[in-house]
Every structure is written in structure tokens, then in C-alpha cells.
Amino acid sequence: MPDLETLLRDVRPTPDPAFTARLDAKAAAGFPRRRRAPRLRAHFAALSLATATAAGLVLIVVLIGRHVQTGGDDSATTASAPSEAARDAAGGSAAAPMSPERRAVLRNASLTLSTTPGNVEKTADRAISITDALGGYVASSSTDMSGDHASAQLQLKLPTDQLDTGLAQLSKLAHVKARSQQAQDVTDQRSTLEARVRDARADRDGLRARLRKAATDAERAKLRAKLDRATRRVTSAERDVARINRDTSYATVDLAVEGTREPAAAVPGGRWTPGDALKDAGRVLEVIAGVALIALAILIPVAILAAPTALAGRALTRRRRERALQAS
Amino acid sequence: MDSERDRSTGVTTASTATLPAGAVRALDFDALYRAARDDVFAYTATLLNDRGAAEDVTALAFERAYRRRSRFDARRGSPRAWLFGIARNAALDELRRRRRAATTPLPEARPEPAPDEAAEQAAERDAVRRALRSLQARDRELIALKYHADLSNAEIAAVVGVTPSNAGTQLHRAMTKLREALDA
């Protein structure tokens, strides 16, 4: 009897010739995929690519749009400001600056814009136009144009209820370098001043009554002197109330325009030069790098989550296969 | 392994589709296919006890191997061990799916001996087949990898995921069980 190993080799199953012929043909053809799977996979790949491309384009457009809005192109943004100012003024100036409110709040803001030296004066003029259109006024203004340096300092008074609108319009004039807002509640202070006015008036009215009833010249002279002092107190107190009302009705905006940015168009006439093309290319690359960074920021957490899941899935599959082997 | 490559016979010599240059250096898929086609079938047929399923699994294994050929890493084992690993996964997936025994008998494929020896040898082979079928799938698999696919112990170890010495031990136990089944 042959040994067991020889017998085992003798009983080795051999494939059917028809099967091997089919398999050989498949191998020779490079194992073509079945029709459904490749079609689905091809669609999936195409859809994924299209989605990713569309998302990338949208992102690029959004990023470029934001870049332009934040001061990438001064001339483009300033051009739209007056029309917006006029539009807002149509509805905005109707509001009364002295509208009585329960609370008295002092509001002020400071805004620093940077633009090219040649645009400083234009920007200052547009700021003044916006102020006028909103029903405000210019408290002070100064422009410094010395050589290459240019800057402007303006103190604008805007109706308090137009402050947010005004700041939004002013911020569109050029690149916003700094912006801050403060508010101080002076309601108690105003109430105290108003009470002082009432007291002073009551005092004055009392003196007037006593003056009418005075019997002697000496008494009348004495009362007139007192009445003059009381009248001055009333006037002073009323002036204080008027001042605080004025201060709360108008917000102060300290606007600084700095001519520190480089001119956007170096060539007269605004022609598009190879240098501009280089800059634009750099900007496009910047945006692409930004998009890639955002994509990485999305993909890395996804990968961090997917990797353990995939490993766990593989381990589970391996265990199930071993179980199937044990069970057979 | 030259003798092993001679195991598969009658393989069409048409080349498969063009492979990437790096993959060609790492893995000659065409040669691997020619050398291992019948061995993979023999292994899966013994493991699954089903000729039809073995054909499907063999075709699937080669298709998967072809798709993944660029991922082959020679540092992690021989091409045959890699291929049989893929075939094993496909076979175990089939076992998971079906969970049923063979339905198609495995026919004798060797040339018939002289008439006076035929009856005796046929009886011996039948006994071996029956004994083999009576073994558990894990033991059957090891024997198939060794004697039907002609893998070395190191390659068997790489396929089933154990150490080479452990593979030798398990194979010895499987052979002992087979002898016991034959004697029973």
C-alpha cells in the first residue's frame, strides 16, 4: 500500500477542463469586471469627483468674495458706498435724532480704515457724504497730505439710531484696520439733572410769587436779586439737560483714514500686466492652499474616525471567517 | 518551488493585461496564475467539499488577486502564500454564506493504473477521500494546503496566520487524525 502522503496527492481534486478554459480566458482578458459593478463604481467615482469639484469651486468663489469685501480692491468697494449711503439716507434720515427714549445711552465708536495714499481724500469725502446722508454732521476733520504719506482724521456725529448703519457703510469704504464701539448708560445722570431743573424752576416760581406780594422797595430789590440767581440756575440746569440729550442723541465716531496700502494698479490706465497676472496667480494659489487646508481639516477627523472603524471591521470579518471554519 | 509550478497543467499561456512596472518587478501575476491555478482549485475543493463552489471561489480568488496585485509586498511572504491567503478568505466567506456540506462528489482525476491494481488502489483512494471529508475543516485545510497545494510549512503559516512551528504541529495533528479516521 502506498504511503498516506502519496495517496493524498493522488486524491488531489483537479479542475474541470471547461472551467479552466473559462478561467484562462478571463485571466487573459485581465479579469474584466461584471457590468453592474463597474458601472456603479464609475458613476460613484464621477459623482464624487463632480461633487468635490463643485464644492471646491463654491469654496473658491466664497473665499475670493470675502477677500474682495475685506479690502482686496478698494476702488470696487468705494464705488458702491455712495449709492448705498444715498439709499439708506432715503429711509434713514427721516428718523428724528432727538427721539425721546426711556434710557439715555452715550455711544461712540472708533474706526481705522487703510487705503492707498491716493484714495485717502476720496475716502474722507465719502465718509462725510455718508454722515450727511444719515442726518449727522462732521464735528472735526483734518487731512495730512505730505509726500507719499497721507492720512485723515475725522470726528463724525451720527444720530444714535443710525450708528450701526453708518459704521457698516463706513466700513465698506476701505480695508478696516481697527473698529471698536463703546456705550455708557447715563439715564441716572439725566434724571438727576432733570430733577435739578424742576427744583430750580419751582424755586424761581416761588420767588416770582413772593416778588408780586412784596410791599417795600427794599424787599423787592432783594427778591429780584434772588430771582436773577434762581433764573441763572434754571438756565444752567436746562443747559446741562440739553447737553446730555444732545450727547445721547448723537453718537461720536472717530474715523482715521490711513494711506498705508500699496496702490492696486501700478500701471497707468489700469492695464492688466504680467506682474498683475503673477499677483493674481499667487492669489489663486493662496486660495487653493486655503481650500486644501479646509479639505484637510475635514478629511483628517474623518480619517481618524474611519481608521479604527475599518480596523475593527477587518478584525470582525477575520473572526467570523475563523468561526465559519470552526463550524464546518 | 519549481516542481510546484509544474503542478498546474494545461494552462493557457496567453498573457494577462499589462501590469504596472512596479508590480511586474514585485509580482509576476501571469506566472503565478499558471503555477497555482490547479493548486488553488484543489485547496478550495478540499476545504469546501464542493466542486461548483470551488470553481467559483477559485475564479473569485484570482480575480481579487489580480485587482490587488499592486499591493503585493514580497517582504511579507511569497506570492503563493499571498495568493492562498486571498483564496482562503474567499473560501471562508463562501463557508460563512452557505454553511452546508459538499453536494458534488470529487471525482478521481489521476490516470487509471493497471487492471489488476485498479480495484485495490481505488478502494484505498476512496478510503482516503472519506477520511479526509470526515475531518474538521481546519484539519482538512491544512492537509489541502500541504499535499494538494504543495505549500511549505512557512507558507501555510503565513496563510492561516500562525507561526511556522505551530503550522507544523497543527499539520502533524491533522495527519494523525486522518490516520485515525482511516484506521477506524
Image (spheres, rainbow, N blue to C red):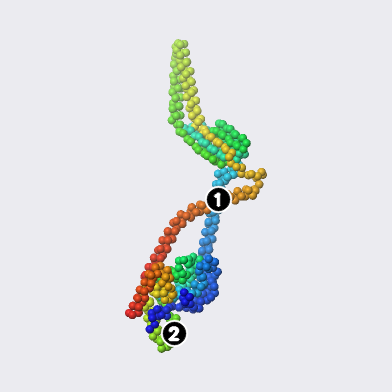
Asked whether residue B87 appears in the rendered view, the answer is no
Q: Say which residue label 1 marks.
A: A287
Q: Which residue corresponds to the image point at 41% horizontal and 65% vertical from the top-left?
A: A317
Q: Amino acid at mark 2?
A: Glu
Residue B77 showing in the rendered view: yes
Chain for mark 2? Answer: B
Q: Give x and y (percent) for residue B88.
A: 43, 70
Element at label 2: loop
> Where does residue A27 sit, x and y in percent of width and height?
52, 72
Tag 1 subunit: A
Q: Residue A272: image x %, image y %?
A: 64, 48
Q: Is residue B58 above or below residue A198?
A: below
Q: Residues within 10 Å of mark 2 (few under 14, many from 20)?
A: few
Residue occupying the point 53% across, 75% down? B13
- Residue at 43% from the left image edge and 30% from the top image edge: A188
Q: Is residue A24 above or below residue A49?
A: below
Q: Are marks 1 and 2 on the same chain?
A: no
Residue at position x 39%, y 65% in the image = A319
The answer to whether residue A5 is above or below residue A236 is below
- Where, by quadrant of the figure, is residue A139 drawn? top right
Residue to which mark 2 is pinned: B112
Identify the residue at the far left of this view. B184
Crowd band around label 1 with a 10 angstrom C-alpha radius: few (<14), some (14–19), many (20+): some
Rendered image quadrant of residue B146: bottom left
Residue A33 placement (x, y as % from top left): 51, 68
Distance in Å between CA atoms under marks 1 and 2: 77 Å
Nearer to the camera, A135 or A77: A77
